[in-house]
Image (spheres, grey):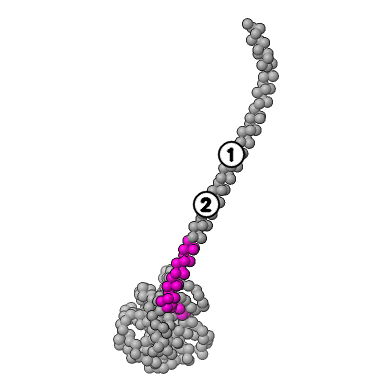
Amino acid sequence: TKMGEHADDAPHEERMIIPKKAANATFVFLDISVTSEGETERGRLVFELFDDTVPKTARNFRELCTGQNGTGRKGFPLHYKHSRIHRIIPGFVIQGGDFTHGNGRGGESIYGESFADEDFSHKHDAAGVLSMANSGPNTNGSQFFITLSPTPHLDNRHVVFGKLVKGFPFLHRIARVSTTSEYKPLEPVMIADCGTVEVLSEEEYVQEMERRTKEREEKQKSEEEKARIAALENAERMAQTARQRVHSALEQAQHVKQDENPVKKQRKVDYGFSDDEDSENDNGDS
């Protein structure tokens, strides 16, 4: 599993370390997993929601990301987590949000089965545009799509309520998943997790980066200190082992020396020689 770093500061809430661009901006994330041949890749898509112009639509998506509204009228959790990306059209869109059927025929908003189109001021003018899927005017539920290129023919028909601000490489990875002739993914593509993102102000950003730098430095110092202590302890163990070996060798040598003296003396007695007798025999012979 591959995934970018993030801090688990609160349930369904993550912290993204980028300067905050808009005072009232809301950011959410979708962690998407792609499983192919037993291997699972996981990447994060982060979106800015347009709360100022389409607050009702933005709120619907945000609260479906957090799952804070419990179970819906259809008996399913009002939550994108563990739902499928059920449609991928290369060069056009990827679509998800059907957590009741998983095939594009279901879903439910936090307001009920569906709600009205809110505003068409934002356009489908780039890749990464986040917009509501529908089955006609005023039929917004929970299904959404993300554009892979400009799609101006969808303007004034689908409500744009956000844009991708982080995760474009993984968006294009999703777009490469093989599909059927009806654009259904042949590999499981799931929303593994989702929630809101806290985006920091310029001052908070600097403070957070300083805090993280300090933590890394302290961690590095701690690891270096642990390594130094471990090296000293290892050196002490080796020295102790060496001392024990020297002591053992000296004791063994002492025992050998003590054992040799009686043997030499006994051999001289056995043969009838002593230092005095040697001297007398030498004098007599002369």
Q: Where does residue 14 sit, x and y in percent of width and height?
A: 47, 76
Residue 169 location, quadrant: bottom left
Residue beneath the point at 45% across and 84% down: 62
Q: CA distance from mark 1 to mark 2?
A: 22 Å
Residue 170 location, quadrant: bottom left
Q: Are marks 1 and 2 in contact (CB under 8 Å)?
A: no
Does residue 23 appear in this view?
yes
- Vertical placement of 63 versus 268: above or below? below
- Vertical placement of 251 versus 42: above or below? above
Give 53 or 18, whichever is nearer the viewer.
Answer: 18
The amino acid type of the residue labelled 2 equals Ala
- Vertical placement of 1 versus 66: above or below? above
Give 196 or 133, whichever is nearer the viewer.
Answer: 196
Which residue carries the number 1 mark? 246
Give 135 or 144, whichever is nearer the viewer.
Answer: 144
Which residue carries the number 2 mark? 231
Residue 90 is inside the magenta segment: no
Does residue 134 appear in this view?
no
Count of numbered circles on the image: 2
Dominant SS type (magenta): helix
- Mark 1, Cα crowd under 10 Å, few <14 / some 14-19 / many 20+, is few
Residue beneath the point at 35% across and 82% down: 129
Residue 210 is inside the magenta segment: yes
As drawn, the label of residue 67 is none
Q: Which segment did they paint magenta?
A: 192-220
Locate the N terminus and report the quarter of the image it occupies: bottom left
Residue beneath the point at 67% across and 19% down: 268
Q: Where does residue 55 sit, x and y in percent of width and height?
A: 42, 89
Residue beneath the point at 66% across and 7% down: 284
Which element type, helix, strand or loop, lies under badge 2?
Answer: helix
Q: Where does residue 238 sit, x and y in percent of width and height?
A: 55, 46
Of callouts 1 and 2, which one flags the residue occurring earlier in the amino acid sequence?
A: 2
